[in-house]
Image (cartoon, rainbow, N blue to C red):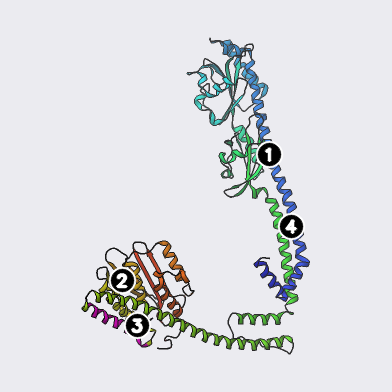
Amino acid sequence: MGPGMKKVSQWILSSLRVKMLAMFVMLTIVPLIAVGIVSYQKSFRTISEHSKASFLLTADRLARDIDVLFQDTARLLELENHQAVLRFLFSQTDSYADAKDILQAFDLYRKTYRNDSVLNISMVNLYGRGISERRGVFALNQNPLRNPHFQYLMNAPDEVLIVPPDEMLPQDRLDGFQYDSEHVVSIMTTVRQRITREVIGFIVIDLDADTVLRYIRDAMAGHAGYFYVADSAGKPLFAADSSYGHLLPSAADLAPRLDRKSDSFVEDGPDGQIFITYTTSADTGWKMIGIAPLREIVKDAREIRRLIFLSVGLSIVFTIGLYVYLTSRLTRPIQILKHKMRKAASGFFEVKVRPAGTDELADLGNSFNIMIEQIRMLMERSIREREQVRKAELRTLQAQINPHFLYNSLDSIVWMAEAGKNREVIRLVQALSRFFRISLSKGRDLISVGEEVEHVRNYLVIQQMRYSDILDYEIDIPQELRAVPILKMTLQPIVENALYHGIKNKRGKGRIRIYGASDQDRTIRLSVADNGIGMSAGKLAELRGLLDDPLVPQGESEPDSGFGLLNVQRRLRLYYGPQYGIVLDSREGAGTTVEITIPVQGGTHLEESVPGG
């Protein structure tokens, strides 16, 4: 059982009203939901399959209509057997009688088959001499075999070739006639001698492609979808305008799915899932493809689902209303006691229960009042003890800083004494004396910002005597901030860290800048910036992670370069609270900036002056 289910189970078992509600639900809602789910699944499956089957039948009807169209048109190819046609194509000289017979034959075949979709019938022999309905007898300016379609038919003389609109260029038309629309489908085949079966010419029938588009529009009528005709590779050949045109998948994506005679499947589209069905024309090999948003295909089923959910929802509302009416008088005293206990659990220990009567609930209320009073006393004692512990931790952290700096300072004095710099040693000892006088501060842990700045200035004087060739500094603290109290030894460890881990490892002279400002929310920001070597992004992320939770001991993972920063961060967090402390920023090769944020008032967790002040 997961955590969520455990919480629900505990909530049900802990409330009398919930138990009664669960009983009502088990007796009324659960059977209704079960019946609704079964009904929905059955109706959804039935209606969805019906809609998909209807969509596929429409695609089949479209394929049959197109096949019948081309079958009717292909009957006109019987003209290749007409004796006048054979003489005209085989002869090298013009024959008015043959041309007249051919044109009469064109007219006869049109009247016989009554195919209004045919735009033109034309034929040409291998020498470029031809005849058409629209132009009559004509001669081509170029060899007809340069036409790629005729080249294909020369190699496959028994085939009937159907050329879609975009594959027949205007200059490839036999008689050069320009139609009002370029949407023309050409049906062509060879004309051969009866005995030798030698190819002597070609016959071409131009069909109005708008007839195919009409079939597509008829198929789309009454369907919330989109139909189009594509070649065997999925490339669209005929497509009507529709608001669903943006759902048209690319030929590259669709081609792998068109390897069967007919099929249906669901794909992810730009506006959700789309249903795709297709069937294959037996005569042309073209694919009749229908696409529609799946939500439209199953729209009726979703209406049924909405009705079922509405019925179940109304039943739940009715059951809950009945439950509230029946239990409001039975559980009200328990609800009042529960409310009081929750307020006590949130930390409000002034809450009291006013028992009415002498029953078990009244006795429970009196016991609750006694318990709350005892908890309040224990909480006050715990707060006092925790405050003493934090004061002790603050003193311990403070004691860690002075020996660390004293070690470095005495090392500088020894180095100068060995170098014979007696006057510098005297100046350094005097600065060190002033430094420790402020460090001691008569036992106070809070000093003014001005004293803290003076403390840092003495430290920098000491270090500048040793590192005069690499160290320069600037202190810019506004006068109005100098009287604000601050935790002692806040800036010096950070400045020391900037010197030893930033500037000392830099080529050339480094600079430390100390500046401050105050915000309108009575917050002071003191910054220590250096132009030292900085640190890498990985090192910066590691140190920021330690600064985010400095009160947790880090053990061996605590870096030496971050000792001063972590020590100051722990002291600031213990004294001022977790919302204050250090923010670190650094760029490798460009330097490091440490910003310290403290409130104008004293600490929020300890007294302004800890014992010993």
Using the image, determine if residue 207 lies above or below residue 488.
above
**Magenta residues, as a range?**
424-442
Using the image, determine if residue 114 lies above or below residue 59.
above
Nearer-N-terminus badge (4/3): 4
- Amino acid of disc 1: Thr
Give the number of the mark in front: 4 or 3. Answer: 3
Residue 503 place in picture, x, y as percent: 31, 67
Give the farthest residue toward the front.
418
- Amino acid of disc 3: Ser
Nearer-N-terminus badge (3/2): 3
The residue at the point 66 percent across, 26 percent down is: 72
The question of residue 436 being in magenta is answered with: yes
Q: Residues within 10 Å of mark 4 (few under 14, many from 20)?
A: some
Mark 4 and mark 3 residues within 8 Å of each other at the beta carbon: no
Q: CA distance from mark 4 to mark 3?
A: 78 Å
> Helix or strand or loop: what does disc 2 sit on?
strand
Which residue bears the numbered disc 2?
513
Q: CA distance from mark 3 to mark 2?
A: 22 Å
Quarter of the N terminus within the rendering: bottom right
Q: Residue 51: which quarter of the image?
A: top right
Nearer-N-terminus badge (1/4): 4
Residue 498 place in picture, x, y as percent: 34, 70
Which residue bears the numbered disc 1?
58
Q: Which mark is residue 439?
A: 3
The question of residue 359 being in magenta is answered with: no
Which residue bears the numbered disc 4?
37
Mark 3 and mark 2 residues within 8 Å of each other at the beta carbon: no
